[in-house]
Image (spheres, helix red, strand yellow):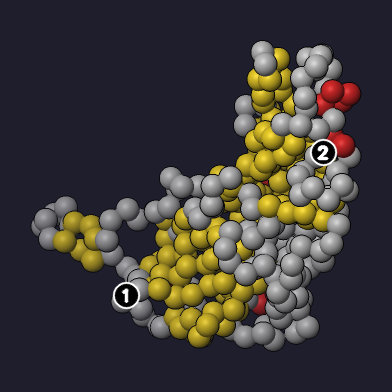
Amino acid sequence: MKKTNLIFSVLMGISMLSCSVDQSTGTPVEEAARLNITFIMDADAERLDNLGNPVTVPEGNAAQNPDFEILGLHFIGLYPDKFTPYDEGVTITSTATTGSGGALAIDFDSEVFFNEEINTLSVPLSYVAAGSYEYIRASIGYQKYTIVYNLEGAETEIPDWPEGVDDNIDVDGIVASFLGYNTYIGSYVIKDQTVTVNGNKAQGYFGLETKGNIEGFVFTQVTQGDAPQTTVPNPINDTSPVPEGSCVVTGQFPSALVIPANATKDINIEVVVSINNSFEWEDANGNGKYEPLLGENVVDMGTRGVFPSVVD
């Protein structure tokens, strides 16, 4: 699997150019200063636990770096210090919730989705309260990425598997995972296959699609499951916990982000999101391969740390 270091920009009011033109005079008009937030999904970033401490993959489990395609966010906020309650930060964006599935849930279709092509949006700094901010938080609602898994067990688990063909074969699988506390999903497309839900799904729900051609045997598999754990790093949990079951990740700036009153220059932020061995499973036979057809279960698919910084 290739190294993942995709760049997604969180930019909330459309501005493709740095200035516009007064149509009546032809004179360039300077655009208002903007806050630009760029997310970098980094497999080499430090791997943290729920409390922001460095952690390795525990004995009995194995993990891999997913090859990212899409990131979906429900919320982004800035926080002055470690004592600021979760619901008292400055909101940069927050997407819709719905009761269509019963209990209140994130509306999947309303999330802000990012990929390699969507990277040129921004929020005017006039929308952000002037002040000093030590922390950024983001509610990650959705992830779509590719993993590698092994077909061991296909001889008995996949109907019409060709006789005499060894099933010890590595294949790519596309994962669509939902990390929000509760998400209302009408339907979603994994790769080519559409999964219809029309209801709420709790944090950890995922769909996995695989297509293959093994010596002329063509197969498509779609499986659904629930990861029992989603790591949500929050280094200030003691003073500013996030709602239980949410996927609101927290990161501290090396030095405080300062938003001046009446800002005249853009401010650019990079947020490195660690996906260092973020797809983790029970490795029953200790071979380091994900083998779901042998009953190996996903145990965690949360991100592994958030590291924001202000850049030129």
**Location of residue 164 with respect to 209 vertically, above or below:** above
| x and y, in percent, of residue 191 in the image | 62, 32
Residues tagged 1 and 2 counted as in contact (Cβ below 8 A): no
Inspect the image, locate mark 2, and give the three-letter code of the amino acid beneath it.
Answer: Pro
The front one of 177 and 11 is 177
The residue that appears at 82% across and 56% down in the rendered structure is: 61
Residue 160 seen in render: yes
Quadrant (top left/top right/bottom left/bottom right) for the N terminus: top right
Residue 60 shows which numbered tag? none
Residue 265 shows which numbered tag? 1
User: Could you tell whether 82 is left or right of 298 in the image?
Assistant: left
| Number of dots carrying numbers | 2
Query: SS for tag 1?
Result: loop
Cα distance in 3D space between marks 1 and 2? 51 Å
Residue 144, quarter of the rendered image: top right
Query: SS for tag 2?
Result: helix
The residue that appears at 66% across and 13% down in the rendered structure is: 216
User: Could you tell whether 180 is left or right of 309 in the image?
Assistant: right
Q: Label 2, on which residue?
A: 292
Front: mark 1 or 2: 2
Inspect the image, locate mark 1, and give the three-letter code of the amino acid beneath it.
Answer: Lys
The front one of 153 and 178 is 153
| x and y, in percent, of residue 241 in the image | 76, 76
